Amino acid sequence: MDLGIKGKTVLITASSKGIGRAIAEGFAAESCKVAICARNKEELLNFAKDLKKRFGIDASWNVCDLSKPREIESTIESVHKQLGTIDILVNNCGGPASGYFSAFGDKDWQEAYDQVLMSAVRCTRLVLPDMIANDWGRVINITSISVKQPVNNLILSNALRTGVTGLAKTLSTEYARYNITVNNVAPGYILTNRLYDLSVVRAKEQNISHEEILTAMAKETPINRLASPEEVASAVMFLASKKASYITGVTLMVDGGLNKGLF
């Protein structure tokens, strides 16, 4: 299928590994101009070299801590200089700390707020003017199954990723007249370092191995397995495509049927 996005400039945040990396690879395969950012310079350099070797593209890369406004501004300025205006923004970030409500103070909440919600606000704010001028754009937020079905021991994610969902729904209405769509992709149990870390925490709580936790997670899912990051990337690619031009304000679950709700 021709997605109709060849030559488009796409910025994927937190993209040196996991879901973000798989998304960047997907856009590179579609001959897009790809910009990646993350906190770890070495990982970014290695990934940029890999993209050059496998897809023949010179990716823009920038070290960026998404909780710091100035680093977000610097990253987007750099992408503009190297690749031009940003057509597609994928707001991705690492998950905030796991834990129950009583474990967190104001500092923890503020850090999670900046990491999860305000990173999406700040990145989106900076790319919208160009999308409006071009009369076309895509904003896609990577959230979590927790926005539909809160997850035990993930109070920060449950609260703040839901905030991103509300943001997206509002923006989808405000900017639809400019042919800008704003959507969310909500992964379930995906084989990433984040899921591994959560399985280790749960294993300690239950005094069993993390392998048993991962197996149990797979069994919770009607499709009876965990997903790969590439399967999340496929959903993102579709929502970014011209084929999805009439889809906006939605949250697309990529969870193997784990969420049992109707909406």
Image (spheres, grey):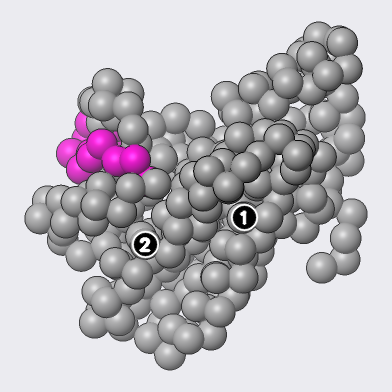
- Could you say which disc has been placed on residue 182 in the image? none
What residue is shown at x 56% (from left), y 41% (from top)? 108
Q: Relative to 183, does residue 144 appear above or below in the rendering?
A: above
Taking the image as shown, residue 171 lies to the left or right of residue 46, namely: right
- Could you say which disc has been placed on residue 122 in the image? 2
Taking the image as shown, residue 108 lies to the left or right of residue 128, namely: right
Q: Relative to 173, does residue 3 appear above or below in the rendering?
A: above
Tag 1's secondary structure?
A: helix
Q: Amino acid type of disc 2?
A: Arg
Tag 2's secondary structure?
A: helix
- In the image, the segment drawn in magenta is 51-66
Quarter-of-image position of residue 193: top right
Asked whether residue 183 is drawn in magenta, I would say no
* Disc 2/disc 1 C-alpha distance (Å): 15 Å
Quarter-of-image position of residue 218: top right
Number of residues whose C-alpha sits closer than 10 Å to that of mark 2, classed few (under 14), some (14–19) or many (20 or more): some
Taking the image as shown, residue 10 lies to the left or right of residue 160, namely: left
| Residue pointed to by mark 1 | 161
Taking the image as shown, residue 142 lies to the left or right of residue 188, namely: left
Q: Nearer the viewer, residue 181 or 40?
A: 40
Image x and y of residue 125, in percent: 35, 69
What residue is shown at x 49% (from left), y 61% (from top)? 140
Asked whether residue 64 is drawn in magenta, I would say yes
